[in-house]
Amino acid sequence: MNKILFFAHLKDAVGEESIRIDLAGKTVAEVKEFLAKEYQLQKLDTAMTAVNEEFAGDDEVIHPGDEIAFIPPVSGG
Amino acid sequence: MNKILFFAHLKDAVGEESIRIDLAGKTVAEVKEFLAKEYQLQKLDTAMTAVNEEFAGDDEVIHPGDEIAFIPPVSGG
Amino acid sequence: MNYYEISKEPIDIQAIIDKVVQRDAGAITTFIGTVRELTKGKKTLFLIYEAYESMAVKKLAQIGQEIEEKWPNSKVAITHRVGKLDITDIAVVIAVSTPHRADAYEANRYAIERIKEIVPIWKKEHWEDGEEWIGDQLEKVAYPTGKPEGADLHE
Amino acid sequence: MNYYEISKEPIDIQAIIDKVVQRDAGAITTFIGTVRELTKGKKTLFLIYEAYESMAVKKLAQIGQEIEEKWPNSKVAITHRVGKLDITDIAVVIAVSTPHRADAYEANRYAIERIKEIVPIWKKEHWEDGEEWIGDQLEKVAYPTGKPEGADLHE
């Protein structure tokens, strides 16, 4: 099972801070495509992805237990 | 009458924080020359001069009541 | 000591400065980011900051490490606030100490630019006529790999 | 409020920062000059700072005015300590607020460089084997007119 975290406008769009779903074996790109469709997320393309709190490329493969977070363009500071 | 202020190594060399002396009519250059001789001040050349708390050029003329200060190279900060 | 923090409470600037005091530092710079009322003529009422807290702390620590490698003998502490902030409230405090002053300015500037690139913190601006999540990078470069690189920095 | 001060007491950093808070500032930078133990391998025990106080306050104010002209909507406060200072004690605090962050760094840097040129303050370093008045400009440019000019600044 995997935990998926959403922030900022993605959280508003999904309506949840996080969901639990099994994504093991999929690549980050596949996860993005799946979620964009499932939740009709317009701006998932512009978000970076973090796996276990570290930025991950589109071809990284998800393992069981991985925490996946979508990081919209940040605006701290 | 004029008040002359000395700071840092000049104060140490003169042995006084300030002296009172009439220098009206002299230029800053003349005052420097006079004091350098009177107190055997080696480093007066490298000091800037302030008249009434404003930097003054060597040809500025001293008026009665002017406060003259010698400003060795500063080292604040 | 925790040099890198996300805080739900107002930030005590002096406490952040105290973390970077060192006997061989002649200079400490701080950057204090405050909530500005006007941005491009539009009046902000208040902001909400949100963070992916655990990752944000790690990324702040990474920035500190980058600085301590680039500027030898530097020491860094950063705290970023989250929650609702009013005009003039403090969003972030960055303190950097170095032996000499030029480095203290440069390293501090590096920290804020890097925060705006890689630290998962977002602000939502609230105006009289609406609200919106702000994303600095939207108007800037996209990261093809999803991983921002130091080379993109405006140093 | 006194934005420019010479202080015989330890400087309260927060009090200096408070002076430059403004609703249209998004950035405040501070520079905190501290007494460093080692300079070129030589160990400092303590320092004595001395000022031509009335003129020093005027010159600090002049620097603030220069900044407020060069960087529109900036606000500046500077306090310099005098007397005996131990290692890590604070000699000077410069706070600058501006609408945007790049200006806050640049204007602050300008202030410290200018202080080291035109403000009548001197430090005497005390080492184990002696003491000496330090004069930065001795190793730099001499001012033929006795008046330093902005053009000499390393901007």
Image: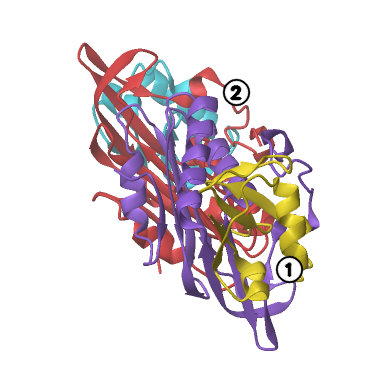
Chain colours: A cyan, B yellow, C red, D purple
Residue at which label 1 appears: B38
Image point 79% across, 52% down: which residue?
Answer: D140
Kindly state the secondary structure of the residue where label 1 is placed.
Answer: helix
Compare residues C43 and D59 and report the one nearer the observer. D59
Give x and y (percent) for residue A72. Answer: 43, 29
Name the outermost residue toward the bottom.
Answer: D129
Whether residue C70 is visible to the viewer of this picture, yes or no, is yes
Image point 65% across, 50% down: which residue?
Answer: B49
Give x and y (percent) for residue C42. Answer: 32, 14
Q: What residue type is labelled 2?
A: Val
Is C93 left, or right, of B73 in this rendering?
left
Q: Mark 1 lies on which chain?
A: B
Q: What residue type is labelled 1?
A: Glu
Q: In this view, does D76 lie above or below D82?
A: above
Q: Which chain carries label 2?
A: C
Classify residue C98 by image quadrant: bottom right
Compare residues C81 and D122 and report the one nearer the observer. D122
Is B58 left, or right, of B2 in this rendering?
right
Compare residues A8 and B59 and report the one nearer the observer. B59
Whether residue A1 is visible to the viewer of this picture, yes or no, is no
Q: Is there one chain holding both mark 1 and mark 2? A: no
Image point 57% across, 54% down: which residue?
Answer: D120
Separation (CA) of disc 1 from disc 2:
69 Å
Kindly state the secondary structure of the residue where label 2 is placed.
Answer: loop
Give x and y (percent) for residue C111. Answer: 54, 45
Give x and y (percent) for residue C72. Answer: 68, 62
Residue at which label 2 appears: C141
Instruction: Using a 10 Å C-alpha cutoff, classify the residue at mark 1 as few (fewer than 14 neighbours), some (14 to 19) or many (20 or more).
Output: few
Image point 34% across, 59% down: which residue?
Answer: D12
